[in-house]
Image: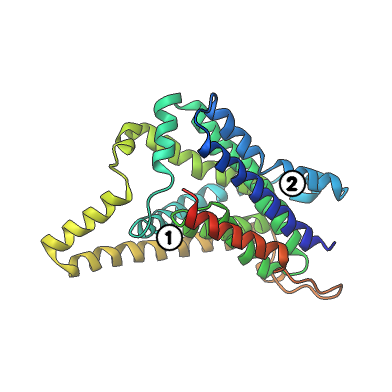
Amino acid sequence: MRKISRGNMLLLITAILFYGLSLALSLADYIPYPMLAEIFAQLLLMIPALVYCAASKTSVPDAVRIKKTKPVNFLMAFLVILCSYPVSAVLNLVSMFFVENAVSDTISMMLTRYGFWLPFFVVAVMPGICEEFLFRGVVYGSYKKSHPMAGLWISAAVFGLMHGNFNQMPYAMFLGIVFVLMLEATDSILTTMFMHFLLNGSNVLLMYAVGPEMYAAGENSSASVRQMFGSMMMENGAVMVIGVLFIYGMMAILFAAAVFFLIYLTFILNHRSLKQTFMQQSGGEKQHIFDFWLLGFVILMIVVMIFFK
């Protein structure tokens, strides 16, 4: 089986295991240790990938690019995430006009019940390792050699789909592009693990600082967002709403431009070429990224997003 097909098969199997466990937990009358279940669910994103590396006789560091990197790359990673946060926030806000926020209630429940450190570990540390290992390591790595540019976009798309809801999907896709670009700029997955940890960790820290009970009470829910803009339209008219959305949109565009400028600067600092990195590779057997396994993954995730609550 070709490398790309193996990567797509791994993706489908991982999604089946992950959402199969989620479905079983949602149907259970009682879960004695819910945080252990959350930890195991995160491990399910990484265990199949480790089996994949063992079966293909590939060393883990080589498979996912675990390499030392220069301290300046962590500084650039911090700046990129800092500028990515407003873009993600705007995409999240726009999605909440149509669907419910899929994150705030879950994290607020964790913080209320378990305090800070355990939710911080589950939400920030584990996804930073496990999700990066799977998506930027094995999945994108399986696409990269044959189709680096297509691999950039498709790996970002499957990362967005794997979140399993229409709320997180848009900003997860954006972040998937950012993470792949920084992986290539630094040639080390440690950079993207650090970025993922910073992004998720800042969300947990912010919610803890503001007070999880505020989110649990619905202050940050999609209904509140729609109500806020509805009241604004009733009191000030559609022009005001359009103006506010325009300001948010311009803010997202400016910060997105800053993100990609910083990524380009990171390529330069590491003496790497953005153009050569994503040029179509020549020679060897032509491999198509989209196959039966990837189609199965897409269908499964669409079903999850529509029917799985």
Q: Quadrant of the N terminus?
A: bottom right
For label 2, count other residues whose C-alpha is less than 10 Å away and answer few (under 14), some (14-19) or many (20+). Answer: many
> Dot 1 surroundings within 10 Å: few (below 14), some, or many (20 or more)?
some
Q: Tell me the quarter of the picture where residue 4 sits.
A: bottom right
Per the image, the residue denoted by label 1 is: 255
Of helix, strand and loop, which one carries label 1? helix
Q: Is residue 201 above or below residue 293?
A: above
Residue 259 visible in rendering: yes
User: Looking at the rendered structure, which numbered label has been put on residue 128?
Assistant: none
Q: Residue 137 vs residue 306: left or right?
A: right
Identify residue type, mark 1. Phe
Left or right of 12 on screen, residue 304: left
Tell me the distance, in whole angstroms, between the alpha carbons under discs 1 and 2. 34 Å
Number of on-image labels: 2
Disc on the earlier residue, 1 or 2: 2
Color scheme of the displayed model: rainbow
* In the depicted structure, whether residue 125 falls above or below residue 157: above
**Residue at screen point 66% across, 70% down:** 150
Q: Position of residue 163 (x, y in %)?
A: 54, 51
Q: Residue at x 31, y 45 (%)?
A: 220
Q: Amino acid at mark 2?
A: Ala
| Picture quadrant where residue 283 is located | bottom right
Does the image show residue 71?
no
Q: Nearer the viewer, mark 1 or mark 2?
A: 2
Query: Which residue in the structure is indicated by mark 2?
Result: 49
